[in-house]
Image (cartoon, rainbow, N blue to C red):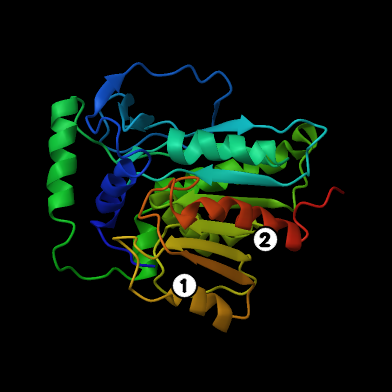
């Protein structure tokens, strides 16, 4: 994976443009939606965060920023469809925001429809200015510098900078496992899927917190840079579009590393989709990834009712 200071904001900006290009690109403040089923994870607050959590809408989807209290929101399947499998869903947004509707709620609902218990992780984020104008300026400034030459952080150093996100993911898995009986979940079939920065969170959790015992990991349009693969690493399902402006044409070291380690891996490179396509960008082959993911889970005996 490529662990760079400016990776996040570039991913965030491109993710925001992906859902529906024809819709309004302006960031418009919105009232915080009701989250009656959100469960606080009790992982603490964010250092130097003084601005309250805020919500806005862009390209027709809800986003949130300045998250200081991590939560987990369950999307449980109809008991008649339930497979016993569970997935923690980590939206992207460059660690400055979360594309929680496009890469969280919609994905979780699709999983629940297929009998998989899904849990949207609203993980803690870096502080941003409280006012929308200041936030837009901060995003623009960071994005403008995203393409400048810069060094790469070693994976261990990058993981050290994701302490909050890893702790939130660890707490999410622990919560799901603790409530597995009540939610009709097999504690041995809990995996994690993440998008963009959420993919980075997913991979960091698998690498730095092996005690989570994830049954599988699925980084969706995340970095393809090689990482050290620990013994017993979970099966990996990776997705990327060939026209992704961030991660295409940079090799597939992540996949190769999993292969060399002798761990199960499947990789889908779609012709089109760009970055931030969520469940798929209409008119491109990226719309096929979700069905491919379902097939992969099924082929690996992760959807078998037990």
Residue 20 badge: none
Alpha carbon separation for disc pair 1 and 2: 18 Å
Q: Nearer the viewer, residue 11 or 121?
A: 11
**Percent position (x, y) of residue 247?**
34, 65
Placement of 160 over or under 180, stated as above or below: below
Q: Residues within 10 Å of mark 2 (few under 14, many from 20)?
A: some
| Count of numbered marks | 2
Residue 254 badge: 1
Where does label 2 land, which residue?
A: 296
Residue at image position (46%, 41%) is 103
Q: Residue furthest bottom?
A: 260
Can residue 212 be seen in this snapshot?
Answer: no
Residue at image position (58%, 41%) is 172
**Percent position (x, y) of residue 102?**
44, 37
Residue at image position (68%, 45%) is 86
Q: Residues within 10 Å of mark 1 (few under 14, many from 20)?
A: many
Q: Nearer the viewer, residue 216 or 272?
A: 272
| Image-based side of 10 in relation to 38, left or right | left
Placement of 272 over or under 79, stated as above or below: below
| Image-based side of 180 in relation to 111, left or right | right
**Percent position (x, y) of residue 27?**
24, 29
Quadrant of res 233: bottom right
């Amino acid at each position: 994976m490529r662990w760079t200071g400016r990776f996040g904001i570039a991913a965030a900006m491109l993710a925001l443009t992906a859902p529906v290009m024809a819709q309004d690109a302006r960031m418009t403040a919105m009232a915080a939606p009701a989250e009656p089923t959100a469960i606080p994870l009790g992982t603490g607050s964010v250092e130097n965060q003084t601005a309250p959590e805020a919500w806005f809408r862009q390209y027709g989807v809800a986003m949130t920023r300045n998250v200081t209290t991590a939560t987990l929101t369950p999307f449980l399947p109809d008991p008649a469809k339930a497979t016993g499998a569970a997935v923690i869903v980590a939206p992207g947004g460059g660690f400055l925001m979360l594309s929680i509707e496009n890469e969280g709620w919609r994905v979780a609902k699709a999983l629940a429809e297929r009998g998989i218990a899904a849990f949207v992780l609203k993980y803690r984020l870096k502080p941003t200015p409280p006012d929308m104008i200041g936030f837009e300026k901060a995003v623009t400034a960071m994005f403008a510098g995203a393409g400048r030459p810069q060094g790469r952080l070693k994976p261990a150093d990058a993981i050290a900078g994701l302490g909050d996100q890893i702790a939130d993911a660890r707490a999410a898995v622990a919560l799901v496992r603790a409530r597995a009986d009540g939610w009709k979940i097999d504690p041995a079939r809990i995996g994690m899927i993440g998008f963009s920065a959420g993919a980075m969170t997913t991979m960091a959790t698998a690498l730095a917190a092996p005690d989570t015992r994830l049954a599988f990991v699925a980084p969706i349009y995340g970095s393809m840079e090689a990482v050290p693969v620990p013994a017993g690493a979970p099966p990996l399902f990776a997705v990327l579009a060939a026209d992704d402006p961030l991660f295409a044409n940079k090799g597939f070291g992540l996949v190769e590393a999993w292969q060399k380690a002798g761990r199960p891996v499947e990789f889908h490179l779609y012709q089109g989709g760009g970055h931030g396509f969520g469940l798929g960008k209409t008119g491109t082959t990226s719309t096929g990834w979700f069905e491919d993911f379902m097939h992969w889970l099924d082929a690996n005996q992760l959807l078998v009712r037990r």
